[in-house]
Amino acid sequence: MQAAPAAAPTANPYGLVPALQQGGIIAISVFTILVLMSIFSFYILFTKLMQQQKIIAQGRKVRASFWNSPNLREASTKLEAKSAYRAIVDDALVAQDQHGKLTDPIDQHDWMANSLARSQGAISARLGEGLAFLATVGSTAPFIGLFGTVVGIYRALIRIGASGQASIDAVAGPVGEALIMTALGLVVAVPAVLAYNWLVRRNKSIMEDLAAFTNDLHGYLMSDGAVKPRMGGAAPASRAAPARTATAPSEPVRTPTTAK
């Protein structure tokens, strides 16, 4: 006696795809918007991380060899073109050359400080590009998903009322599918908020290092190279430098911060 043929597997009537098919243009539009938000959020995250890492690596080079150069113009050649530290040095050199050309000169300290502050502000603005989008996604994605849920529940209730069935099996499916949109909104919003907070923290650390470098550069230019930082810690005991005299000023030691 032959066994009866197995019944063909039926398609799953629940899930994301049925919810989109039954939700119509509104559900598909909400889903598309959330997907685009997620894609752009991760794109901004990875591009900003690469940008920040490039500046952090340049800062290590500055601490390693920049201040050992005999003059500022030669030191600037050790920095990568179009990097943040190179832009500050180039702006400082331009400001130094332009100060003597002013028909109504101002104090050189003020002129240099304003020029360096403007350069530093431009770098801060570039580092902050894209972060507003992450903040917008983090604050609006849950509400966009909630909008899809409200519309989905409304359509589900209309179908339930038209069919005249109010049992749990008739209500749970359509309402559960509508709640998928709320879950998608949270999935998009949470990574965006975490990325925003992380990038802002790293930007703050980077700007602290740039501010310290700008201050050192200002002192170097205003003293014709006599004042510059000594990077690193104390020398080993076997190679320790001779003790300074009471009248010799000590060099400042810069303790760098590292973005995490």
Image (cartoon, rainbow, N blue to C red):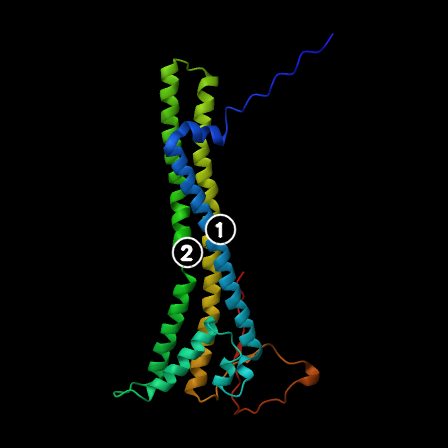
Cα distance between the residues tagged 2 and 1: 12 Å
- The residue that label 2 is drawn on is 131
Quarter of the image that includes the C terminus:
bottom right
Judge by depth and name the residue closer to the eye, 209 or 177: 177
Please tell me which of labels 2 and 1 falls first in the chain: 1
Is residue 193 visible from the viewing direction of this image?
Answer: no
User: Taking 147 as reference, is 256 above or below it?
Assistant: below
Q: Amino acid at mark 2?
A: Leu
- Disc number lying in front (2 or 1): 1
The percent position of residue 43, horizontal first and vertical second, equals 48, 53
Report the residue at 57% width, 92% height from top.
Answer: 245
- Secondary structure of the residue carrying tag 2 is helix
Residue closer to the observer: 82 or 95: 82
Residue situated furthest top in the rendering: 1
Q: Residue at x 42, y 81 (%)?
A: 218
Above or below 170: residue 105 = below
Determine crowd level at label 1: few under 14, some 14-19, many 20+ residues with C-alpha closer than 10 A. some
**Quadrant of the image containing the N terminus:** top right
Q: Is residue 235 visible?
A: yes
Residue 225 location (% of width, % of height)? 47, 88
Indicate left or right for 2 with 228 as reference: right
Q: Amino acid at mark 1?
A: Phe
Numbered badge on residue 42: 1
**Pointer 2: residues within 10 angstroms few (<14), some, or many (20+)?**
many
Q: Position of residue 52 (x, y in %)?
A: 50, 63
